[in-house]
Amino acid sequence: MHAMTDDELLHYARQILLTDVDIEGQEHLRQSHVVVLGLGGLGSPLALYLGAAGVGRLTLIDGDRVDPTNLHRQIIHSQATVSEYKVLSAKARIASINPWVRVETRAEHATLDNLADVLPTVDVIADCTDRFATRFMANRLALQYQRPLVSAAALGVEGQITTIDPRQPDQPCYACLVPDVPEVEATCAETGVLGPVVGLLGTMQAIEVIGLLLGWPDRLVGRLTRFSAKQMQWQSFRYRKDPQCTVCGSAAKL
């Protein structure tokens, strides 16, 4: 990879000033690869901030097209990109901010098949989808490929975020936290969502991904952090590895 140009260094100047990043960390971000599952309310700020921060390679996966009802919260898209595939809309927006990152797109929903060739080169998985089935699939793939997974969710005026890191075998996986897919699954299309709530959680995901890439300590592994907009309150809970977990424990079917 070529050395950073003067224009690139200027783009990252305020970030490089941070002792927690500096030029070495910026170069590490530049050589990193993150896969983003979903370019909706969570994936919008996440992809924008990762791209702006200089994560060198982003793979965006989402099969949906931009709809007018998305725009109050999915800020990576615009009126001009309504009806376009979200991944293409997002790619163009990231390029307008930071043309030095490589953005790959897959206009399809995440599946075992279309992730199998991506994950071996990925450093972090960011799950920004709104379906439990995808979260469980991402969790299994994270364990299979030994890749950290940052998972967030938001609905109504509340949201939550946690990190799964299979590189730490004593730490829990997503199935330790949520053992089964709920029988009734609500989405924002059915119950609504406050735009800034998903924006906040997506931004938190971006911070967590950057922290993982840079090796910062005290990540959200084994810790669920919840936010309530109505009470304007954060709460954090520890959860443990389940020895009988069907994904990472003694009952595992992997």
Image (cartoon, grey):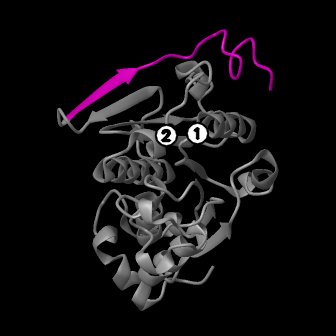
Amino acid type, mark 2: Thr
Q: Residue at x 63, y 33 (%)?
A: 166
In which quadrant of the rendered image does the C terminus lie?
Answer: top right
Verify CB contact (< 8 Å) between mark 2 and mark 1: yes
Residue 1's spot in the image, x, y percent?
63, 79
Q: Which of pointers 2 and 1 lies earlier in the amino acid sequence? A: 1
Question: Is 45 above or below relative to 228?
Answer: below
Query: In the shown orientation, is residue 10 left or right of residue 62?
Result: left
**Spatial distance from mark 2 to mark 1, Cα to Cα?**
8 Å
Q: Quadrant of residue 147?
A: top right
Mark 2 or 1: the one toward you:
2
Numbered badge on residue 131 = 1
Residue ID for mark 2 = 187
Q: Which residues are magenta?
A: 233-254
Query: Which of 98 and 66 lies nearest the eye of the viewer?
Result: 66
In magenta stretch: residue 97: no
- Direction bottom: furthest residue: 6
Label 1 amino acid? Arg
Residue 247 in sight in this render? yes
Q: Quadrant of residue 69?
A: bottom left
Q: Secondary structure at mark 1?
A: loop
Q: Position of residue 16 (x, y in %)?
A: 34, 70
